[in-house]
Image (tube, helix red, strand yellow):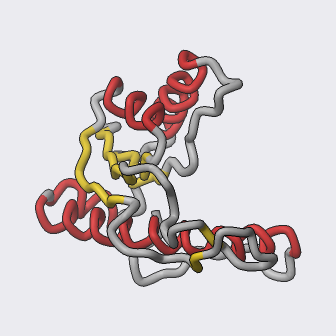
Amino acid sequence: MPPLDVAPKVREDDPFMAAVLAVWEPVVTSLGIQDAEALTALSARYPAFREAYAQGKVVHHALVARSDALAKADAFELVAASAEHHQALGYAFMVTEATNQWTGAAFEALGGVRVHFAPFQVQATVRKSAEPLEGVTTSPNGFLSDKDSGGMFYVIRLA
């Protein structure tokens, strides 16, 4: 995880990345807000986390959603193997934003702790449109998701 005041580097002059980020911008923004709130709270409350974060020892496990084509055990193994790999690399903590119940279940099975919740339907954040519009993220109700749940931020101690 980069420090909160450092924007992650994205491949410049990459038409694929530009297209993906254009459509995913509202999601990336929402996750970024959740990251900032959760990382700030963890750092303020837990000195060991604050120190590990300052030393670059907190790894971000991003976009670990289970598709219907992937067995539940395989989804868990992806998270477990990642935790084991990052522990071997010397990371002290692994964090994620779980917007899929399988990611949250895997983190909890490994002793992960839920530390922040961001509901999907608090404020409309995308353009409201019954029909998809080219080049802009839309939804019928203006929310990022039609689920009445949200994103849960988890942390696992690896060290």
Who's the residue at 37% across and 74% down the image?
Answer: 123
Instruction: Tell whether 23 sits left or right of 144.
Output: right
Quarter-wise, where is residue 56 in the image? bottom left
**Observer-nearest of 65 and 87:** 65
Residue 72, compared with residue 44, is above or below; it is above
Q: Which quadrant of the rendered structure holds the C terminus?
A: top left
Residue 25, compared with residue 112, is above or below; it is below
Who's the residue at 64% across and 33% down the image?
Answer: 67
Instruction: Tell whether 2 sits left or right of 25.
Output: left
In this view, the residue farthest toward the front is 130
Instruction: Tell whether 58 sits left or right of 24.
Output: left
The spot of residue 60 in percent (x, y) is: 48, 53
Who's the residue at 55% across and 76% down the image?
Answer: 126
In this view, the residue farthest toward the left is 45
The spot of residue 54 in percent (x, y) is: 33, 68
Who's the residue at 57% across and 76% down the image?
Answer: 128
The spot of residue 57 in percent (x, y) is: 39, 55
**Observer-nearest of 80 and 88:** 80
Residue 71, compared with residue 63, is above or below; it is above
Instruction: Tell whether 145 sits left or right of 67.
Output: left
Looking at the image, how many numbered discs can be counted on the residues?
Answer: 0
